[in-house]
Amino acid sequence: MRIAIFYDWIGAIGGGEKLILTLARGLGADVITTDVDRDSIKKMGFEDVNIISLGKTIDLPLLRPISLSLKLAMCDFSKKYDFFIFSNNFSHFAARKHKPNMWYCFSPPRIFYDLYNLFEERESFARRQIFKIWVVLHEWISRRFVDHVENYVAISKNIQKRIKKYYGKDSIVVYPAIDISKYRFEKYGDFWLSVNRLYPEKRVDMQINAFRKIPEERLLIVGGFERGDRSKKYAAGIMKDLPQNVKVLGSVPEDALTELYATCRGHITTALDEDFGMTPIEAMASGKATVAVREGGYLETVIDGKTGILVEAGEIAIINAVRMISRNPEKYRIECENRARDFDIPAFIKKMENIITYRRR
């Protein structure tokens, strides 16, 4: 069976990109996208996956999603493949021409819904009015294409609820997977690890401010930013006044990242109502506990008190949890490694194959 996976763009190393490329490899599928950062693909170790680019999008904040949506809506691969998968924010714009299909949904576009206020408040008054008009029009058009999606698969129960809330659609849940064989435990080092895109909703500034108050602990932050004002401005802002015990490494190759997981003391993640969150799984596969905010997908992956500590979103709570784990990081290792096995690749691919086979009947 010939399968194609539509994905918005591949512009940085991220959990979504790793997941889709893992799925493509497991299904023997092609990935159809727009912008492609080949260096990121190489760093993630997915050079063997066939990626088809529809061309570059317009490098302006509100025009980029429009140009992306147009490229997806206008392309036609209906004769080349037998089944189509959509993923990320706008790939469903290809749904009208490409059936049978399913949306492996990371989330309904958060810029339209639960993160609307976060995006709006960062704009000037004039740009805010343009932003409001853009959201109303693009969200209305987006819903027309959502109607062409035949099957919904959510990456978490958290996203299943969002799909029902915003689209009124039922979905099944298939948790993402990682290649746990790539990860290993080496030691409990002298630093904590944070792995995320440098976006406002990741709340990396909260991590930095917490570690500013515990100079005896070190924090290494891995993650880059993509094209777009919100990412660049946020990254520039958090790097203006870094304390001496915090360092931003930017994007790193996959082998360097697994080495950091293998040698860190613990892992921290603070994203706002995270869709699922791949990094706690990667940390657990390395025998490391996670400090995560008590929100979103982390509630479905981190077992509080066993594979990490769930905290309220605040600096004091983070500080207390970091200190608690640092006193005895070994305590969490066995539970972490056992939990990571629940998210290995073979079971994930099998579930997706079963869904595709059933939906094609």
Image: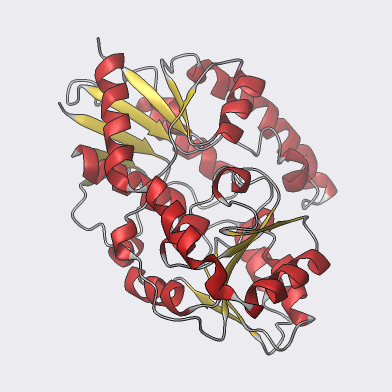
Horizontally, residue 310 falls left or right of residue 228, namely: right
Q: Residue furthest top?
A: 361
Is residue 240 among the parts visible in the rendering? yes
The quarter of the picture where residue 166 lies is top right
The quarter of the picture where residue 209 lies is bottom right
Q: In the image, residue 359 lies at what x, y percent?
A: 31, 15
Position above or below: 190 against 169? below
Residue lying at 69% horizontally and 46% vertically, measured from the top left: 295
- Seen from the viewer's position, the closer of residues 111 and 70 is 111
Position above or below: 298 against 361? below
Residue lying at 26% horizontally and 29% vertically, measured from the top left: 353
Position above or below: 66 against 197? above
Residue lying at 30% horizontally and 42% vertically, measured from the top left: 23
- Seen from the viewer's position, the closer of residues 171 and 63 is 171
Residue lying at 70% horizontally and 82% vertically, measured from the top left: 242
Q: Quadrant of the N terminus?
A: top left
Q: Quadrant of the C terminus?
A: top left
Horizontally, residue 308 falls left or right of residue 132, namely: left
Horizontally, residue 7 falls left or right of residue 190, namely: left
